[in-house]
Amino acid sequence: MTTSKIPRIARVRAFCQQGATSNQGADCHDVDDEHWLNCGLAPIATPMSCYDQYKAARKSWGINALGTLAVEIEAEDGTVGVGVTIGGEPGCFIVEKHLSRFVEGQDPRNVELMWDQMFRATVNYGRKGLPIQALSAVDLALWDLLGKLRNEPVYSLLGGKTKDRLPVYCTTARPDLAQKLGFVGAKIPCCYGPSEGGEGLQKNIEYFRKWREQVGPDFPLSLDCYMSLSVPYVTSLARALEPYGLKWIEEYLPPDSYEGYAQVRSNLRGSTVMLTTGEHEYTRYGFQRLLESRCVDIIQPDITWMGGLTEARRVVAMASAYDTLVIPHGSSVFSYHLQYAFPNCPLAEFLNLSPKADSIVPYFGDLFPDEPLPKDGFIDLPDKPGFGVTLNKENLTRPYPRSDEESRRQALQNLKQPPLKKASFPF
Ligand SMILES: [Mg+2]
């Protein structure tokens, strides 16, 4: 008996979404001006809050400058896999002009090989940020394609389900409504940063206290600080909020402040407040630093940003060896499949993207009409191949189109490799 025949990859296409409003697509920051995530219900501290002109709204400093990047990978039999990330038009350039050459002509099962070639080839300008986000979208499209070709959900390709159902918490400006909607916990933004001084610190404490009162003592409530605080500030804030049952405090320092994260861990030793970060960390190299310093209790990789599923499963394995939980940031289905497949990913995040945080709407806007949504505190996945979602290309454009002939030429380069004839010691 021979194994099933898998078609090779014929072409790669990259799309972005132009001028979107109230339809954030794969860029969760690209929301309407009045949206709660743009400070429409309460202030949200950011790394730019120290500049007066950029305090009032997150979009004022271009948090949504890049927008959606969607990648399609088509096999020779016409089957198409889809991956998304933030990256917009510059991301399209990287995928079409650079990464596509390592994918077209390949056997779609060779995800490790393609990941390694894409990473090594971008290392002179990559390693973190946009190039790794672009790589992530390609990697996710490969897993989606592989699932569709094998007629299996991605979690099944990863080793199957480790849990029957996945509980979900809500990131929101209205934890009272998240509680009513059935979420198992909520996370609210931190309103003020160190530049607002002692008065801002008191207002932060009061804001959390008010919501704690509204949701009662037993509803897990966390605080997301979006890289906006300093070591002494977060130390004071966490200590002040501990009596109000702060579950975890998230991403309180810039991601490169590894020493700062270690210092906060040391300052808060013995506290019941859990420490978390990792939303803006990239690849196993970045997460290794967080894990080996044991500075946080939970890492929060965004699967659509940090290197895709191929890299995420390595990070999940590393985290399990450090007995550290993995609770990914956003990423919807691209996270959920990973979380079902591994035991140390016990809880999903759902970022409430309705403008007033009062209803459940898709994380990716109208990019995937069949995106599964949380219900009664769980996220259940349909038994569909790949990631189980269909890309709506209505508002997407392809800024750097390449001809089929160009894809064929690139594919030939990957097909032409002669087999090794002479064995040699490999290192
Ligand atoms: Mg966060």
Image (spheres, rainbow, N blue to C red):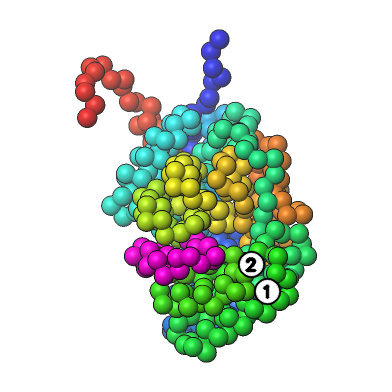
Indicate the quadrant where residue 355 lies.
bottom right
Amino acid type, label 1: Arg
Q: Position of residue 88 (x, y in %)?
A: 49, 59
Q: Is residue 368 left or right of residue 288?
A: right
Amino acid type, label 2: Leu
Indicate the quadrant where residue 145 lies.
top right
Secondary structure type for disc 2: strand
Q: Which mark is residue 278?
A: none
Contact, mark 2 vs mark 1 (Cβ under 8 Å): yes
- Label 1 beta carbon less than 8 Å to ligand 1: no
The residue that mark 1 highlights is 212
The residue that mark 2 highlights is 221
Quadrant (top left, top right, bottom left, bottom right) of the N terminus: top right
Secondary structure type for disc 1: helix
**Residue visible at 58% across and 57% down in the picture:** 330
Q: Position of residue 37 (x, y in %)?
A: 60, 72
Q: Is residue 235 above or below residue 202?
A: above
How many numbered marks appear? 2
Q: Is residue 414 above or below residue 355?
A: above
Q: Position of residue 217 (x, y in %)?
A: 70, 69
Question: Real-space Cα distance between discs 2 and 1?
Answer: 7 Å
Residue range in magenta is 254-277
Q: Position of residue 60 (x, y in %)?
A: 51, 78
**Residue visible at 62% across and 53% down in the picture:** 348
